[in-house]
Amino acid sequence: MTNPTVIHSTFQLERKLKATPERVFAAFADEATKRRWFYGSGTHALESHQLDFKPGGHERAQMKMGPGTPVAGKTLVNDVIYEDIVPSRRIVTAYRMSMDGTPFSASLATIELMPNGSGTDLLFTHQGAYFENADGPEMRKGGWEKLLGKLVIELGE
């Protein structure tokens, strides 16, 4: 067999949050809130963002990568389809990322929210296929760890 051209990887991240499942869910569902914690204050400039948060709905964000990154000046696009949404319980997305029009990964991400007394246990499962010139599984996992950290800050924890 020749060398495969796609790297496959699955990882899970868990967070215990003080916020209720309803508050955590709202941080993903509300466009302005999600834009603030998910796309804000990074090494990029957000050029556009649209969110249609419903089953079958789409989300699209376009960013210009900032100085000091290996891809400074390039355009990153994140295209998302919401496959399944159960309010305050589950969000399942399929998303594709591209750099300057060339796709570099396709992923399935599942966010499960489970009440734990007065707070929420968040279980994030990511299944990814990484193409040539992709960031790879370890960088993606690190990126999601940072995003969940920003979610914690957004929730005021």
Image (spheres, grey):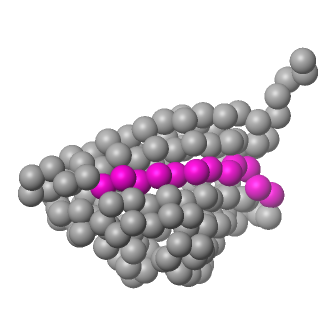
* Magenta span of residues: 102-113
Q: For the point 35% across and 46% down, which residue is it?
A: 123
Q: For the point 59% across and 73% down, which residue is it?
A: 56
Magenta span: predominant SS is strand
Q: For the point 38% across and 40% down, which residue is it?
A: 13
User: Which sits in the foreground, 28 or 89?
Assistant: 89
Answer with left or right where residue 55 lies relative to residue 99: left
User: Which sits in the foreground, 36 or 20?
Assistant: 20
Image: 156 above or below 110: below
Answer with left or right where residue 28 lies relative to residue 54: left
Q: Where is residue 124 in the image (x, y as percent from the top left)?
A: 40, 47
Residue 111 in the magenta stretch? The answer is yes
Image: 136 above or below 113: above
Asked if residue 49 can be seen in this view, the reply is no
Q: Where is residue 67 in the image (x, y as percent from the top left)?
A: 59, 59
User: Which sits in the foreground, 38 or 17?
Assistant: 17
